[in-house]
């Protein structure tokens, strides 16, 4: 694990490598990263990761929203002693950065979430594992070792399976439950539909179900004997359009882990979250993959933060650069979650690719802060920003 | 006909087809649909459908206007029981979606409006048949069967023909008359002019005239013996630049069918509509095909809705995605009409193409609503939107 | 000359030609027109016409400014009786459209201004002849015949030549003097500079000087014996950076023709114009060819109109479509002047090309008005516009 | 050196060259200049000059900010007597233009800063030499001759070296010290990182260190015997993240030369500058090369000017055209500094290339002023601008 001041050291490491004739084999800029991923991944897998809902308008707006704010750097402050660390719901983090839950990473790279967990763990960056992972939460936990991890819950419509997921997550050392709200069912995603590609239907991304005792108990035959039957069972338990605020009390009583709600965009939903006794909020529109036309997350953030009172608010969807993270934090986010960047990193370089993307992001974040005169997250607030004219 | 909850089932149908090795042969995204149509249609026909007036600025602005509003989805509502149905002027509709009148569909596909009527009927979606159709209203009615249908009237400058059109529409089971206001004559359309292509002059798109007793009575010879004479008669009766508000009383007395005025953009014209005793308004700029530089329909909508009082207001021009429909309804439209999307669907796949486009749109609309926490049209109002920053 | 209601007849003419197998050989849209001009003109001539000052930012903004306003068409008005005619400073015009002065048209087409004068005259559209024409004002007057014409004055720094120009213009039937203010000297124009192409230095565009008695009187040898000497003399008399408001009184006393000032962008300059006793103002930034970064003409128009009191205000720079003309008139312009469109028309088709561009523009203007419910210029005011959101 | 009224003479020179068959071999527009530089420079060198930090968003915004203001030219003023001269901190300048410090110009062209100094000197335009130059300040001074020059200080973390730099600059005739504030260390620059290219590590751009007695005193072996040791020493003394406002008093006492602070973006930092007794401020974001997401310099300028009281404020980052300079001056800048333009000029044409870029810029500036009715810098204020609508 890197020490707290060494994120920017990745810069030196790269330049010094150049002296020895070694250049980064992995792309540095996000544009190059996406282009390379498009080249090396299967069209279906690339489309699945890169695509969004409908016209992909919200996906684009997520990026655009960050252009609406400008950092006003301050000069001549001693920025030698940098500490990006923070603590959210008892989790000590070296930087306000997490890996967002992304499903089915097995289609991106053979090592899938195992590689991601290893990369994240090596840097001490928390990984939020998706219910829809290609590997079981237990296998990922083992790969992560002591690495910090939260479990993202796609709350199935079967209570026993839901309960089993939460228990297994607790047992496997996941230290919080992130309940995704914005997928009562899958959205209209043209890229996937054009290829008629839904990985889950081929058994990809349902490892947590296949390995679940409650899920298996409901099968007539074991998954390996009747894979189609298992998939059809998954089809029947995955969507949960009847889930409402009331049901959160069941989960609240079920676990003593912190619970975060992911997908909040309206301040009234933030207020409702307080009522339910959950512990945190993630402002997200699922990377523009659910409601096309939905508000960009950075645009939604300030009102949600104001409504959320003492609950910590995190943000994902559209974070690409260190400056994006600084802006989100200045507008009230306690941390940001990366999604597509690390998925593409996985695609182009496996564990090393994820680590490269993460180290690059952390280096850029630390440098952006230092060059803006900021050495602690507590110094980042609305006063460092101006709206773009 | 699909049941009220099954629109989104098209998504499953496509994905399950993928398991059997079958992918959609028809484009999913609008961009792909337009590209495919450009490929398979004749340049003249594609230009006729795809083109607009002048610099096509209004055509582009129609799309842009939808980008000026953002949906703020709500979470954790029970969205399992969805009902998109509505009733407009006595017409029960499974969803707030209609097919806009588009003329001369015979140049797009050999089956023209017949294919469209069959596709719309199979889904219970109302079809507004254009006066300028390639098939007679009677033939289209037969193709539509029990399918709901309205008749769009290009009010000819000859009263007897106008009266005959209305009577025939009544007899053929069209349940409303949609009077198009914005074509007292054709606009300056560079794509058509460059090709010197006006389909009507070759006898395309004037079936309703050629088959009309009042029209034929004015010909010296039957159309099949003297086609040129028939076209010239059409040229003399089509434009109607002297039509004014006063003449609507004639039509009002002529028919007991509901009358809608299509092409209203100014609130004062909505107020005038109330005075005339018509029953509804369609905010439209003819898909940007008449006044280049005209206000985008979504921009015009709120003021027209406010001025229209109890009259139902519908909207067309620029609707491409489910999110577009949700935004239009949130700003006061009772329904939206699709134009180019289904015409391109017809071009690339005939009746199946139209049905594919419609099912895709309806699935996306239902999913956009559900994922935004909305299960009834009555829940969609201005409060679900934020203006784009 | 066309009758007042026949502008839109060009549309029918084109479509009917299509029936006989004849399509317009000349481009209809401005984009196509410019593309064709680029193809057929020499790179130097095309660059000279198409280019602007500096980064060409103002040139682009001139077009963009028209996008900032939207027409709100009105329906069901009797638009059969259209009259676009107007009178400006005693000049009866069939439409609020003139041909802006463009210099050196001989590099665009062998017939240069003679072809333009003939085309304009055939339609009764006034032509403002440039001092920097490739043909003398007398030759152009003869080509124009009874066609209406104004003379644009690049006021030379030699008073006798200036006086001679004005006298000759009077004698040749030019009915107003348009004093260009914004060219005390030529701007920094990268396209011309890159080709080191200034046509005047090769004797192009100085016909009015070479044929001028006062100019010739100052030459040691006649131009045909010593062309270089004539050019050098031109170089010495053309720039006039010392010209100030005070000097206008000299011109005012010199001629009884109406005087218009072209190039006014600031309302204080409009007020100054009133003081000097001139008769009209043309808001212009020379098509973005002089001050790069200058305000777009349509943006400058309202304040100038307000300051100009009773003086008629015209506008050029950026007018491309009928809708542009309607917007300019709605914001207070009495007429618009076309520049590049007709110059490109000349390049691609000589006299026929100019006429084609003019007839297309007039047809589109008439149709835009009629389809917006407008039949007289007096009905066009600020109330028909909404600002773009 | 050019006289004060002759900047625009470059225009005539080019056009007259055209008569003799000679066209500019060097690009006129910035777009062409950059394209040519990309062609002739090594990819690494071009990337180093052309690239910015992170997503290069601030780099683009620097240009965009100038589009937010429009010049409103005034007519009929006597603009024959132009004087662009100014005096800043005792330095008489023929125009409000300087050459910004750009490091490592040896990778751009073999003659590096020597060529730049010669070109600037030949026009009397001040050159701000970078600490990170490829040539020593003494060699550059010799090349500059009587040419005006300031020295830009990257304040090393070693006080003796810093003191030595300042003394040497004084001795070599540099008449001001420009302290760069925004590089306590290098930013995250994807183009350089992708190529693992940091020129300093190969000994490029550290001439001022290698030739410095204080620096050499700290080496175990002379640089030519142990170049790697020298580079490593540079690595250890260059970054200075502990530099704070307090340390400026040391410099203030150390030299009687005027001191300017470069990199101020926040008005509070301008106020702090007043307190420290420095003499001037340069609003800069290092050409978008340090904090990606930082405010554009022109957007930051007005508030800094207001806060800076009597201190002269200069601006760099994004200045490309004469209009840009006029706008910056109108918003309070006393002068602008050019960076990439002259670096690309150096790349494509050495000393001649720099001179060409400078002469072009000065000609365009003078012409933009004259054509806007302005003959003195004192006439340029906020009243000549309108915000873009």
Image (cartoon, coloured by chain):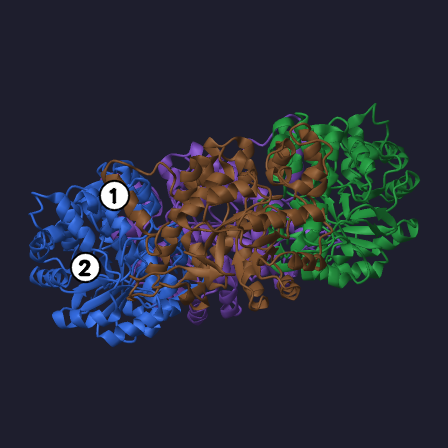
Chain colours: A brown, B green, C purple, D blue
Determine whether, in the image, residue D154 is placed left or right of residue B72.
Answer: left
Of residues C96 and C90, the one drawn nearer to the viewer in this rendering: C96
Task: Check the image and report above or below for B229 versus C345.
Answer: above
Secondary structure of the residue carrying numbered label 2: loop
Q: Report x, y in % for residue A119.
A: 43, 43
- Find the distance from the CA under tag 2 to the CA under tag 1: 20 Å
Quadrant in the picture for residue D161: bottom left
Quadrant in the picture for residue D178: bottom left
Number of residues whose C-alpha sits closer than 10 Å to that of mark 1, classed few (under 14), some (14–19) or many (20 or more) = some
- Location of the C terminus of chain C by quadrant is bottom right
Q: Is residue C21 visible?
A: yes
Of residues C120 and A71, the one drawn nearer to the viewer in this rendering: A71
Q: Report x, y in % for residue C342.
A: 49, 43
Chain ID, mark 2: D
Q: Report x, y in % for residue B179.
A: 80, 48
Chain ID, mark 1: A
Point out which mark residue C191 bears: none
Q: Which residue is mark 1?
A: A16
Q: Do the dots labelled 2 and 1 sit on one chain?
A: no
Of residues D241 and B239, the one drawn nearer to the viewer in this rendering: D241
Determine whether, in the image, residue B41 is placed left or right of residue D214.
Answer: right
Question: Furthest residue to the top?
Answer: B225
Foreground: disc 2 or disc 1? 1
Q: Report x, y in % for residue D60.
A: 39, 52
Determine whether, in the image, residue C55 is placed left or right of residue B193.
Answer: left
Number of residues whose C-alpha sits closer than 10 Å to that of mark 2, classed few (under 14), some (14–19) or many (20 or more) = many
Q: Which residue is mark 2?
A: D156
């Amino acid at each position: 694990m890197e020490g707290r001041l060494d994120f920017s050291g990745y810069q030196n490491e790269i330049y010094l490598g150049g002296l020895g004739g070694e250049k980064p084999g992995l792309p540095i800029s996000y544009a190059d990263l996406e282009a390379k991923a498009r080249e090396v991944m299967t069209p279906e897998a690339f489309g699945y990761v890169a695509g969004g809902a409908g016209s992909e308008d919200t996906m684009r707006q997520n990026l655009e929203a960050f252009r609406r704010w400008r950092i006003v750097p301050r000069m001549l402050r001693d920025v030698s002693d940098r500490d990006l660390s923070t603590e959210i719901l008892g989790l000590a983090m070296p930087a306000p950065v997490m890996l967002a839950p992304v499903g089915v990473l097995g289609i991106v790279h053979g090592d899938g979430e195992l590689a991601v967990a290893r990369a994240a763990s090596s840097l001490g960056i928390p990984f939020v594992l998706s219910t829809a992972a290609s590997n079981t939460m237990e296998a990922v936990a083992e790969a992560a070792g002591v690495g910090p991890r939260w479990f993202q819950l796609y709350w199935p419509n079967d209570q026993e399976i839901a309960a089993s997921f939460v228990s297994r997550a607790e047992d496997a050392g996941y230290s919080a439950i992130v309940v995704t709200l914005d997928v009562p069912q899958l959205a209209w995603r043209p890229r996937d539909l054009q290829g008629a590609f839904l990985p889950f239907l081929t058994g990809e991304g349902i490892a947590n179900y296949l390995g679940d005792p409650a899920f298996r108990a409901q099968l007539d035959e074991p998954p390996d004997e009747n894979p189609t039957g298992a998939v059809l069972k998954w089809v029947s338990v995955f969507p949960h359009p009847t889930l409402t605020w009331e049901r959160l009390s069941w989960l609240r009583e079920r676990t003593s882990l912190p619970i975060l709600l992911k997908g909040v965009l309206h301040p009234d939903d933030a207020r409702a979250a307080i009522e339910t006794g959950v512990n945190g909020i993630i402002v997200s529109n699922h990377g523009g993959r659910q409601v096309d036309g939905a508000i960009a997350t950075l645009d939604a953030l300030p009102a949600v933060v104001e409504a959320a009172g003492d609950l910590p608010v995190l943000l994902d969807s559209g974070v690409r650069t260190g400056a994006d993270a600084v802006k989100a934090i200045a507008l009230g986010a306690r941390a940001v979650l990366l999604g597509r960047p690390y998925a593409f990193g996985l695609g182009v370089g496996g564990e090393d690719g994820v680590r490269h993307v993460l180290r690059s992001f952390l280096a850029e974040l630390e440098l952006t802060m230092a060059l803006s005169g900021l050495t602690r997250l507590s110094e980042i607030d609305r006063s460092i920003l101006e709206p773009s004219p």
